[in-house]
Each structure stands twice: as C-alpha cells, then as structure tokens.
C-alpha cells in the first residue's frame, strides 16, 4: 500500500457509483490479507469488501476492509487504513486497524482492552454535546448525500464541531483513542465497522445501531452516546 500511495493509479474501476472507486491497491491488499488468513486459519470464514469470501467451519469469521478510504488514497490525502475484525459466533472478538502512513496500529481483544502501538488508550470522557468533537461520513449516492446535508445542518449548531476524514474505520479508531468524542454514520457495511466498534467498546466507550434505514452506527463514551443518538435520528 505504501509503495502504491502517490504512484500512478492502476486497475481503477467503479462500485456503487461513479464517485465510489476501487483500485488495484484495494485488490492487492485484499489478496495479501486473504493469503495470510487462509494459511493461518483455514477453517475460519472470510468476508472482505472486494469480494473475497469463504464459509466458516468453526463459527469464526474474519471481516476485512483492505483499504478504507480509497478516494483519499487515490487523491494522496493522508487518511486511509486497513481494518481487520474477527467475529466468534457472531460476536466481535478481535479488532485491528492499521494506519500505515502514521505507523499506528490500534488493537483490541474482547475483554482485553484497547491499545495503540502497545499502549492502552481510552475514549474521551465528555458528557455534553455542545463541547463534543464529532466525526461522520457521507454516502456516494447524491440523494442520500442531500439527506445527510440536512441532518448536518441540525447537528452543527449542537456540537463543538464536525470532522469528516473519509474513512469510517479510522474515525472509530480515533474515537477509541480520544482524538474525537463521537462518531455517527449511515450506510456503512460490515467491514467498515467490524474492527472499529470493538476498539471503541474495549476503550471504555459504547456503540449503538441507529434506528431506521439505511443501517447506521453511533459511537462515543456511555454518557455522551444517548444524546448523540437522539440528535442524529
């Protein structure tokens, strides 16, 4: 990934819309991760964003986003990561998010806390929305983006400010590390949130699925989360 970052783009294609790309960097990263997992854990299942998939023989499944923040990656914008989560009988068991540009690895094991490069991290203890820094993301669908713009007009006056880095997994890792106070987004996929939601929980925070469609997720510390969910639903 680092070798390809800033280099000429190869194998560019589209997914859900003209503005939702996939590149050879995404595919190559997924192939590398799949090769490792199949070699080390042949009985585990796999669900990855670019199509790699296998059924589980033991109740465990890896959920992989090989490159979260593809648009950022293609533009040379330094906010993208690799996200790998492990589910055990449908429950999050392990979450790892790696930010190659910063040399940062966020890691959590169920019941074992959350760490950044081997040091424990915690969510920020803030209980008032008006002083909270909130991360979010936007859809690639124009109609959905218009709805999100309307919501943002309601959110902005109620919080300290809003950040949009363009990589949901990284947003959740930053909630876990206290770099932002909360996060919300609709329209994510399992690979966007599988690792990050465990990071938040093991860092002392909480997550909640947002009611309604499309599927949404909010994350913050336990004191702030109810107010954030109320604001964005």
Image (cartoon, rainbow, N blue to C red):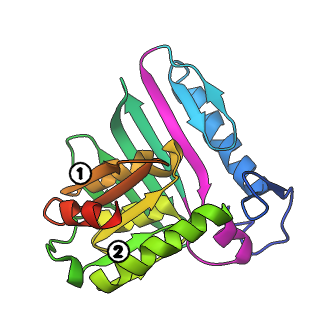
In this rendering, the count of numbered labels is 2
Residue pushed farthest top? 57
Name above or below for residue 111 compared with residue 101. above
> Observer-nearest residue: 197 or 138?
138
Answer left or right for 165 relative to 153. right
Q: Secondary structure at mark 2?
A: strand
Can the viewer see residue 109? yes
Task: Report which residue position mark 1 lands on.
Answer: 202
The quarter in which the N terminus is drawn is: bottom right
Q: Position of residue 96 (x, y in %)?
A: 42, 50
Residue 178 sits in quarter: bottom left
Give the number of the disc on residue 32: none
Q: Residue at x 25, y 79 (%)?
A: 132
Task: Report which residue position mark 2 lands on.
Answer: 134
Can the viewer see residue 139? no
Magenta residues, start to end:
58-81
Name above or below for residue 154 compared with residue 84. below
Sort mark 2 into few (<14), some (14-19) or many (20+) by Cα contacts within 10 Å: many
Q: Residue at x 32, y 53 (%)?
A: 199
Q: Position of residue 139 (x, y in %)?
A: 59, 62
Mark 2 → mark 1, Cα distance in angstroms: 19 Å
Look at discs 2 and 1 and give the one toward the viewer. 2
Sort mark 1 into few (<14), some (14-19) or many (20+) by Cα contacts within 10 Å: many
């Amino acid at each position: 990934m680092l070798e390809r970052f800033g280099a000429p783009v190869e194998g560019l294609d589209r997914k859900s819309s003209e503005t939702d790309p996939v590149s050879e960097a995404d595919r190559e990263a997924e192939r590398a991760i799949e090769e490792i997992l199949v070699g080390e854990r042949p009985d585990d299942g796999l669900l990855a964003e670019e199509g790699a998939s296998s059924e589980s023989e033991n109740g465990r499944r890896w959920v992989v986003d090989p490159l979260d923040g593809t648009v950022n990656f293609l533009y040379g914008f330094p906010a993208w990561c690799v996200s790998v989560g492990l589910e055990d009988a449908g429950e999050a068991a392990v979450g790892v998010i790696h930010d190659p540009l910063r040399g940062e690895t966020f890691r959590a094991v169920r019941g074992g806390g959350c760490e950044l490069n081997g040091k424990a991290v915690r969510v920020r203890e803030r209980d008032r929305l008006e002083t909270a820094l909130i991360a979010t993301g936007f859809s690639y669908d124009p109609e959905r983006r218009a709805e999100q713009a309307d919501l943002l007009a309601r959110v902005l006056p109620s919080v300290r400010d809003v950040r949009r880095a363009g990589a949901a997994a990284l947003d959740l890792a930053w909630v876990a590390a206290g770099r932002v106070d909360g996060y919300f987004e609709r329209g994510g996929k399992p690979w966007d949130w599988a690792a990050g939601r465990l990071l938040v929980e093991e860092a002392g925070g909480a997550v909640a699925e947002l009611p309604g469609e499309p599927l949404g997720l909010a994350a913050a510390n336990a004191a702030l989360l109810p107010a954030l969910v109320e604001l964005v639903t």
